[in-house]
Image: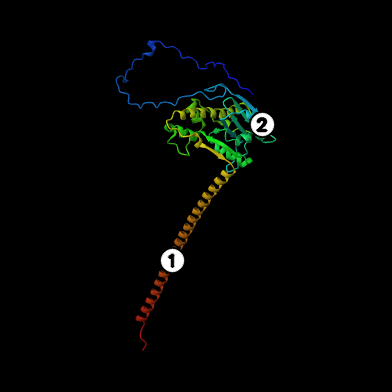
Amino acid sequence: MASGVNNASQIPTSRPSRAMSSTSNTSQPSRGTTSNAGVANTARPAVPKKPAFPLYTFRAPPTGEPPNVFYIRDYQLANKMVPLLQSPVGFDTEWRPVFVKGAAQNRTALIQLADANTVLLIQIKVMKYFPQKVEELFENPDIIKVGVGIRGDALKLHRERQLDFKGLLDLATFAKAVDLDKWGDRSQHSMPGLAALCEAYLQRSMTKGKITRSNWEMNPMTQAMQDYAANDAHSSVLIYRRLLEIQSEIDFPPPWSEHVFEVDTAATFREEYEAEERRRAKRQREAQRRAVNEKSKALAAQQAQVRVDTTLIGAATYEIIEEITEEDTDMSISPIAA
């Protein structure tokens, strides 16, 4: 489906304000009121508002020509179209959300692949077979795949279909490396998302509303879903190109190759092994804490029992002493037999 740029102008819907005469705008202070003229304004200065950028749309990109967008639901057509893509390629995925807490995620339903001129929306959920050319693109280290949170998308597909990935680059990590002034203070858990990167480097805003919770297994997808999916993949390519420009302006730029990584069987096994080791260590720490707590509780119970026993012994001893004292008293006052 080829896209075109919508040049239709929008008609303003707001009603123009009525013109007011200069005399009507000059108000006299009424009797009993105090004029504010000459009084210093002690109000805090207004915080500058965040600039409002136009929405990102592949139909009118900030640079270059609009790409051609193809919504593909046949694996054979996908195999014909994927080889047309050139590096770098924007990569993203979508799946039907789960609204039950703790439930497993649904399988990937849609794969978005894009270069500057072409966007492919490949709905693998409705295909009879997984496209072989998509798998080959993922495994090709010479084709750089870019996106935000790209490791999670690759790992999900790897676990679902045992796919291997080479030449992956996360835009958030790369942005932090080449633009320290803007992102240098971000931790690994507070990295910028695609919307923040889009505003910073393309001067466009992106909406992430209810459309993200759509049923991506729907066949066919709505036009709004197609537009959203195409924007995500296409904007990633433009952001990557802008980051390369910034990198070229640095005196001693960090090589982008340091940020390219893989997701394959060996890497996944290593990551899962390390994760399992962390979980095992956590279980051991929790078991040790439980053992310490149980010992503390047992010791507290023993001490409480000792106090109870001591109290009972004391009470019993007191009763015995009282009995002996009473007996001695009785004997001391009893009459002597004649």
Q: Quadrant of the C terminus?
A: bottom left
| Towards the viewer: 148 or 291 | 148
* Distance from Cα at disc 1 to Cα at disc 2: 80 Å
Q: Do tag 1 and tag 2 residues touch (Cβ < 8 Å)?
A: no
Look at 51% across and 35% down and name the residue there: 257
What percent of the width, then of the height, locates residue 42? 32, 26
What percent of the width, then of the height, locates residue 74? 68, 31
Residue 247 falls left or right of residue 272: left
Secondary structure of residue under mark 1: helix
Residue 66 falls left or right of residue 187: right
- Which residue lies under the disc numbered 1? 306
Secondary structure of residue under mark 2: helix
The residue mark sitting in front, 1 or 2, is 2
- Which residue lies under the disc numbered 2? 79
Q: Quadrant of the N terminus?
A: top right
Q: Tell me which label, 1 or 2, sits earlier in the chain.
A: 2
Residue at the far left: name it.
38
Look at 50% across and 26% down and name the residue there: 202
Mark 2: which amino acid? Answer: Asn
Residue 195 visible in the snapshot: yes
What percent of the width, then of the height, locates residue 34? 31, 20
Residues packed near mark 2 inside 10 Å, few (<14), some (14 to 19) or many (20 plus):
some
| Towards the viewer: 254 or 111 | 254
Mark 1: which amino acid? Answer: Val
| Towards the viewer: 196 or 295 | 196
| Towards the viewer: 150 or 222 | 150
